[in-house]
Image (cartoon, rainbow, N blue to C red):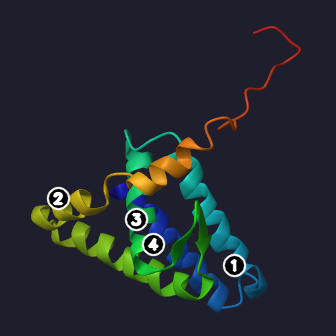
Amino acid sequence: MEEAKADAVGFFGLKWLVDRGVLPVDRLEEYYASYVAGLLRTLRFGAGEAHGRAETMEFGFLLESGAVKRAGDRYAVEYGRMPAAVARLATELLAIEATGDRARAEAWFAKYGKIPPELAAALARTSDIPVDIAPVFSFQD
């Protein structure tokens, strides 16, 4: 829950900075696309650890909110819906943490804590694409 909250509140803060002219508004869509791409990249590792589970929950919430939509075997960012969806996501995660409501947290994990079958299938189709690079150095260890 903490990892998802950190992501969501960070992106909520990013929009706040854009709204105040600290960051350029013409790059906001790029920021949101990068956020969603980062979620998908991390999801390729699975949901077995805290970051993967956080990304699973975030992606599921954004999908349910219509901020990300499935287009055939691909996913697309709905930029106009992202600010409100990220604000709702951050609000919910902060509220769960602030109230310490265990039942609410468990319901959240039950609803969003697993990779949906359609997404798992889409991720499986990328298995031949490297997840990360493995640098080879010319000097000895």
Give the left or right position of residue 65, taking residue 73 as reference.
Answer: left
Secondary structure under tag 2 reads: helix
Residue farthest to the front, as pictured: 72
Q: In which quarter of the image is the C terminus?
A: top right
Distance between the alpha carbons at the discs numbered 4 and 2: 19 Å
Mark 1 or 4, closer to the camera: 4
Above or below for 65 versus 8: below
Q: Which residue is drawn at 39% across and 44% down?
A: 47
Q: Distance between the residues labelled 4 and 3?
A: 6 Å
Q: Name the residue under label 2.
A: 106
Q: Contact, CB < 8 Å: mark 1 with mark 4?
A: no
Q: Name the residue under label 1.
A: 29
Q: What's the distance in space between the residues labelled 3 and 1, CA to CA?
A: 20 Å
Instruction: From the image, tell me which residue sits under label 4.
Output: 62
What is the quadrant of the N terminus in the image? bottom left
Q: Is residue 45 above or below residue 54?
A: above
State the residue position of label 3.
Answer: 60
Q: Which amino acid does label 1 sit on?
A: Glu
Q: Give whichever of discs 4 and 2 has the lower sequence position.
A: 4
First in sequence: mark 1 vs mark 4? 1
Q: Are marks 4 and 2 in contact (CB under 8 Å)?
A: no
Q: Which amino acid does label 4 sit on?
A: Leu
Counting residues from the start of the chain, the first of labels 2 and 1 encountered is: 1
40 vs 86, nearest the viewer: 40
Q: Which residue is drawn at 48% across and 63% down?
A: 7
SS category of the residue bearing label 4: helix
